[in-house]
Amino acid sequence: MSPSPHPIPASSTRNWIALAVLAVVILVIVVAVAGSKGGRSPEQSARAYIETVQGDTSEVQDSVKAAQVVIASAISSPTSGKLHRLAQGAQTAYEEINSVHGSFAHPDTGNGLGKAQSELFTAAEGLRNAMRSFVTYAGNPTPSARAQAATGYRRAMAEWDRATTAIWRIASLRDPPTVS
């Protein structure tokens, strides 16, 4: 004896069709929302990144500018008192830069911002290393240590200024937190 086929009620078929249409609509919405996140303009991406790191870029700028005073003084006339202040100022700047350095590592590979972000991260690392070089120089003030610290510092300042200027330019903002 074979089972007798029961027709599917029309209301059940309509329910399945309605569920299928609803699923397709939800899928389209999810895809559209996901696509819009990646579809930000370079300016929008740069502004979002700046919002994230603005306090940290200001801290780097302030730390370096404070250290510049003791660096200039100790380089021009390296007395023991000035070298001591250089060691303290450079160590403080090193620690402040080190505390925020990692926040710059938010690569956004789209919209041309990724390269500028990578350069900002590298420049912060360069400034941090330059401060460490000045601490080393203060402990052993040889001409070669001074030259190495000064060269690394100038290079790092230029890299920082280039990177911040690039990101601020992409975001169409003025007054990037440069250090030179």
Image: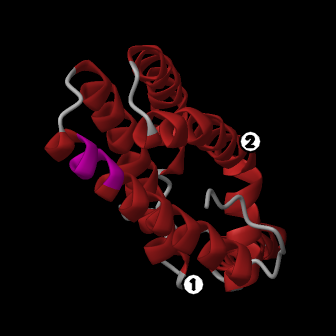
Which of the pair 160/55 is nearer the observer? 160
Q: Is residue 143 visible?
A: yes
Q: Which residue is mark 2?
A: 55
Residue 86 disc label: none
Against 77, residue 11 (above or below) is below
Q: Nearer the viewer, residue 156 or 110?
A: 156
Give the residue at x 40% y 36%. Answer: 131
Query: Mark 1 falls on what kind of element?
Result: loop
Q: Position of residue 86 (x, y in %)?
A: 46, 25
Q: Main secondary structure of the magenta part?
A: helix
Closer to the observer: label 2 or label 1? 2
Going by the image, does 84 lie left or right of 47? left
Question: Magenta stretch?
Answer: 146-150
For the residues labelled 2 and 1, the Cα–Cα distance comes to: 23 Å
From this viewpoint, is residue 23 visible? no
Q: Quadrant of the C terminus?
A: bottom right
Q: Does the magenta-highlighted stretch encompass residue 154?
A: no
Q: Position of residue 1 (x, y in %)?
A: 35, 61
- Residue position marked by numbered label 1 in the rendering: 111
Where in the figure is residue 33, as x and y percent of width and height? 72, 72
Give the mark count: 2
Kind of residue sitting beneath label 2: Gly
Q: Residues within 10 Å of mark 1 (few under 14, many from 20)?
A: some
Q: Residue at image x 50%, y 55%?
A: 106
| 10 Å crowding of disc 2: few (<14), some (14-19), many (20+) | few
Q: How are the residues colored?
A: secondary structure
* Point 33% across, 26% down: residue: 135
- Which sits earlier in the primary sequence, circle 2 or circle 1? 2
SS for dot 2: helix
Say what amino acid the circle numbered 1 marks: Asn
**Is residue 147 in the magenta section?**
yes
